[in-house]
Amino acid sequence: MDVVPSQLEHREFYGILLSAVGPRPIAWVSSLSASGQPNLAPFSFFNVVCANPPLLAFAPGMRAPKTAAAAGEPAGEAKNTLRNIRETGEFVINVVTYELAEAMNLTSGEYDASINEFEVAKLASAPSKLVRPLRVAESPVSFECKLHQILDFNPGPEGGSLVIGEIVSIHVDERHLKDGRLDRNSLDLIGRMGGMQYTRTTERFEMVRPKVE
């Protein structure tokens, strides 16, 4: 089968993307509104994009508008996380372990901006060091970020933006340190697959890169 994206319904094309591109790491993003309302939500379009400067990026999609759009192209509605970051320029990316999967899933609902997802998922929060948003206390690694850049693509309900943040501080739970370094094998991280599927990253293997003379 060969397909051209423009010839597919959005739902069908989106399904191919999510099923074929995986497992995708999950950015559990905590943010604050300008008025100080906490927000916590997961995003699976996420990765490291640069080490120097230290940049992480995630891509929140747009929501379908709650009210009927005016004539012309329908506009999407920015998710609370994106709106908060535009307002404050700060956020925290918390990693998600298998133990935190259910709590993470609870925070994925399209809640009103007045809802505190930390409370919905019964999660403990902890103060950050250099930014105002709280971090997830139970997450083994949290990246405090200052906004570097936002790239806006399609403003419609099927579009989205790319949020790039510069890491200004990293919290690592000392229980996951070994000889002073982060023990990657102690992190029971999960990844997002297509549909409602997730995967654990506990089945791992090693390969040595070839040496080219």
Image (cartoon, rainbow, N blue to C red):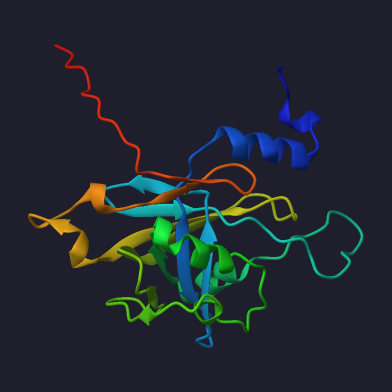
Find residue 201 and report its horizontal and vertical position in percent. 38, 44
**19 with respect to 26 (left or right):** right
Q: Quadrant of the C terminus?
A: top left
Q: Residue at x 40, y 63 (%)?
A: 93
Can I make out residue 96 in this image? no
Find residue 193 and report its horizontal and vertical position in percent. 55, 42
Q: Is residue 197 above or below residue 31?
A: above
Q: Residue at x 92, y 60 (%)?
A: 71
Q: Is residue 134 above or below residue 21?
A: below
Q: Residue at x 39, y 80 (%)?
A: 125
Nearest the viewer among 124 and 68 is 124
Name of the residue lying farthest toward the bottom:
35
**208 with respect to 148 (left or right):** left
Task: Report the number of discs.
Answer: 0
Name of the residue lying farthest toward the top:
213
Q: Is residue 20 above or below residue 195?
A: above
Can I make out residue 4 in this image? yes
Name of the residue lying farthest toward the right:
71
Find residue 123 and report its horizontal and vertical position in percent. 44, 77
Q: Residue at x 25, y 29 (%)?
A: 206
Find residue 120 and report its horizontal and vertical position in percent. 56, 78
**140 with respect to 22 (left or right):** left
Q: Is residue 211 above or below residue 34?
A: above
Name of the residue lying farthest toward the left:
179
Q: Quadrant of residue 168?
A: bottom left
Q: Quadrant of the N terminus?
A: top right
**65 with respect to 129 (left or right):** right
